[in-house]
Amino acid sequence: MSLLSRFARLASLPIAAHRLFLLAFAVLTLTAVGLRWVGFRRLSAILQRLAPASRCPALNEREPGIRIRRNLEAVRRAAAYCPLETRCLARSLTLWWLLRRARVNGSLRVGVRIQDGAFESHAWVEFEGRALNDGADVRERFVLLDAPLWEQINR
């Protein structure tokens, strides 16, 4: 698909989706830069302050599914257009922040594994125990950093 047709497709989005894309694009770009310059700990603290967790349901929707899908699609689109390399941590932090802003309290997860002798880490977002931006088997492929190791070994 040519660049012109990609932008034409983007321009044809409804205004609410266009605004969400622009926000996701800005946050993703800043998150990718922020991870390199200030690190995960400081960046996640900043993001938490900018969109604190909410216990309140959204005003117009009973189910968070629509908000999850909209934000997930916005992050996917933003990653496709972002001029920087955006790895799973930047994409997941962006999705996590957008969901918090939309009053959906997802959980940012980080896991590790050794694959073919190489250490690998991976980040994803979960809501009610279900991975949103990865496959359902992500917990089988990676050991969660926040879970006790013996729990993972004794499965």
Image (cartoon, rainbow, N blue to C red):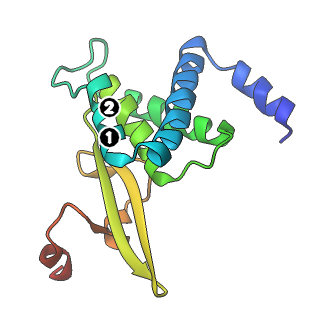
Task: Residue 111 in the image: state x and y as whole percent.
Answer: 33, 64
**Of the pair 55 and 43, the residue shown nearer to us:** 43
Task: Residue 10 in the image: state x and y as whole percent.
Answer: 70, 25
- Separation of residues labelled 2 and 1 (CA atoms): 6 Å
Q: Which residue is mark 1?
A: 42
Q: Residue furthest front?
A: 37
Please tell me which residue is depicted at 13% across the width and 74% down the height of the picture.
151
Q: Amino acid at mark 1?
A: Arg
Task: Residue 100 in the image: state x and y as whole percent.
Answer: 30, 29
Do the residues bearing badges 2 and 1 touch, measured as CB atoms within 8 Å? Answer: yes
The C terminus - image quarter: bottom left
Task: Residue 93 in the image: state x and y as whole percent.
Answer: 40, 42
Horizontal side, residue 35 vs residue 96: left or right: right
**Does any portion of residue 73 appear in the rendered image?**
no
Q: Which residue is mark 2?
A: 46
Horizontal side, residue 50 vs residue 22: left or right: left
The N terminus - image quarter: top right
Binning the other alpha carbons within 10 Å of mark 2 as few (below 14), some (14 to 19) or many (20 upward) gives few
Vertical side of 5 occupied by 1: above or below:
below
Please tell me which residue is depicted at 14% across the width and 69% down the height of the picture.
148
Vertical side of 32 occupied by 124: above or below:
below
Vertical side of 57 occupied by 142: above or below:
below
Please tell me which residue is depicted at 35% across the width and 70% down the height of the picture.
112
